[in-house]
Image (spheres, coloured by chain):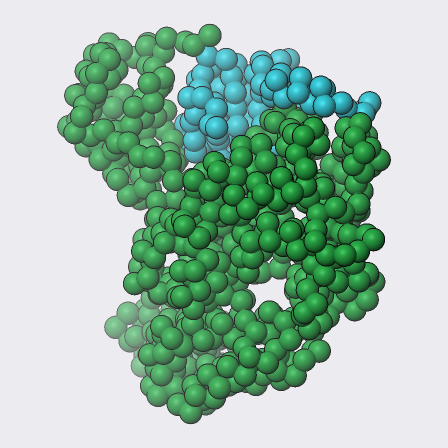
Chain colours: A cyan, B green
Amino acid sequence: MAKLTPKDIDSKIAAGLDESGDWIKVGMSTCGMAAGAGEVFSTLQQEAKKRNLGVRIKKCGCQGMCYAEPLVEVHCAGLPDVVYGRVDKETAIKILEKHISAKTLVNDNIYEVRTKRQA
Amino acid sequence: METDRKIILLADTEQSQQDKLRDFYTSFFNQIKDKGLEDSVALVRASDIGIYGKGFAVKIFPRGIVYTGVKESDIGAIIDASVKGQGTVERLLFSEEPKQIRIVLRNCGVIDPESIDEYIACRGYGALKKILSGMDPAGVIEEMKKSGLRGRGGAGYPTWMKWKFTRESQGDRKYVICNADEGDPGAYMDRSVLEGDPHSVIEGLIIAGYAIGAGSGYMYIRAEYPLAVERVKKAIEQAYECGLLGKNILGTDFSFDIDIRLGAGAFVCGEETALIASIEGKRGTPRPRPPYPSVSGLWGKPTAINNVETLANVPYIILEGGDKFALIGTEKSKGTKVFALTGKVRNSGLVEVPMGITLREIVFDIGGGMLGDKPIKAVQTGGPSGGVIPVDQLDTPVDYENLQKLGSIMGSGGMIVMDESDCIVDIAKFYLGFCVEESCGKCAPCRIGGYQMLNLLNGIVEGSGSLEDLDKLRRVALAMQRASLCALGQTAANPVMSTLRYFEHEYREHIVNRKCRSHKCRSLMTYSIIQDKCKRCRVCVINCPVNAIEGDREKGFFIDVSKCVKCGKCFEVCKFQAIAKE
């Protein structure tokens, strides 16, 4: 990557975080990994590819709700952002099938719903 | 595109039984159906919506209305007012300001920690750009002074003073060090910050370097955090590639390098002088201060050592201004503190709260209350250097001074919640044992004093203690506090002293009555069989490792106390709760 100038930093900050399209974030810090986030991440990647879903699967750090790891945050057009907790392989597939494809929330694993990004 | 469907979340904030929520869900669903609304509404069961102990909660999107304490009879009114119409049911309405403020954890769980682009997109390195394009080092320190930020590693020394002293010290070279040798049992705030947002710490370290006039810095990370080390390494490489580290940062005259040093996992290496010795390649033992590291630190040069969390605050302060930061918190403790909430609490995890919040709010409003709704007994803060805060002090605002008054310390941020099943003497013994094991052995008060105190505690939990031991404990503790070389020894006795202060009656029970009310101290327990409950199934007889259970199916079974080794196996295997433990 080329060296940045102060201007580059300004323009990158102005552009903001690219949160366009549908995406899924998996908490991949030690607390998440210990609870099985690695498996959830790879399941999501494989199954999304299999189903030809145009959803980005991303990594992120610990959100703080370590008791409910692995945490998966889902952003899907037309729905509020939802944080699912205690996600396993089956729930991961449910998230893809129900939340992303059918646009309905998955029961019993919701830990947080955000109408808009928290500051 | 927003769908016109309303989303209704249902949650049981008592978290008693999933079945109850399912019944509630069913009746809610039926009423929606009766009113012919099932196509315009999506009804979902949630596990947790951040509200606790308030009965059933209903949250309706997109408006985000929250109702709590909802009974089945209220469902109709809610549907009419907020699902069909645009109104609310005032008496059930719930609103609360969020208790958590995210400054240190602002990016944790938001950005990809392995992507510098995402960090920059969240205003990352904006603070570095700001200082390099028009703030002199004195201005940076002035901003830090305004913020009132104090060290988050435990002692709470004002960061700006540390920086100012290091800046004013004479030396041809100066260093900054990030202390990421987090070793308190049950504390993992620094690990999460390094794993979730490594660039914020790196940016903080660069700014610290600029402020004190250092040309290089070290990240001292314990080797037990492999993922954190990997992510920090990657982050440093990215920063070099982008010209945010190295020569002529952002095209200015300022140059700064960062290197990683791994700690081999000695607790004492979190102490600054021991940490410096360890970086220099020497044995990690502390040395007397003064001279303080700000005068003579790494390789004899002026050095500023800051904790991970302290540094993660720095970019925010520079960007937002010290005044804004100082609005949060109490008079003498500004900003927020990250705590690792663990133990017998329902929602264990990381919380970032403004200084001045009470322990009760942390445990009950954020942590969701106690596991299994057992009564809370105490909260341990500050790890092995801290103390135990009893339940009647839970409403004390949390800041550096208040915790010290209570005989504990803020510490790095471990917070362990205890209920009645935790034996206070056992807890004190655990923390003291930790410090005895981690004592480097350089000075006698810590090396010998700790060992002697541990022996006394062992005697108490084994039933051979005497009341004089309590005085002895206090005397040795005082000697350790006064005469130990470093904070490890000076504070090692804190858990014992604070438990003696608030729970002396439990110590006395162990000594005088030979009883442990929490049934934790094995030597003080006796097992017996409750004949009325015993079904004479012989499972305990088969499982007893020392054949201490005698008798037959006709006469019943008995535990021979002289043979019993108090392993608790019979208690575990009995399906009829016919084993009594006292």
Direction from residue B362 to residue B543 in the image, left or right: right
Rendered residue at 74%/46% (across/down): B213
- Residue B258 visible here: yes
| Residue B109 placement: quadrant | top right
Q: Nearer the viewer, residue B33 or B318?
A: B318
Picture quadrant where residue B230 is located: top right
Q: Is residue B182 left or right of residue B498?
A: right
| Foreground residue among B548 and B251 | B251
Residue B40 higher or lower than B539, as above or below: above
Quadrant, the C terminus of chain B: bottom left
| Identity of the residue drawn at 81% across and 66% down | B282
For the image, the number of numbered tags is 0
Question: Is the residue B42 above or below the residue B147 in the image?
Answer: above
Res B17 visible? no
Q: Is residue B518 left or right of residue B108?
A: left
Q: Position of residue B480 (x, y in %)?
A: 56, 80
* Residue B62 position within the rendered picture, expressed as x and y whole percent measured from the top left: 36, 17
Quick one: B359 or B490, which is closer to the camera? B490
Q: Position of residue B540 (x, y in %)?
A: 43, 72
Residue B147 in the image: x percent, y percent?
A: 52, 43
- Picture residue at 69% right of the left edge, 58% below the top: B294
Residue lying at 33% horizontally and 9% vertically, measured from the top left: B39
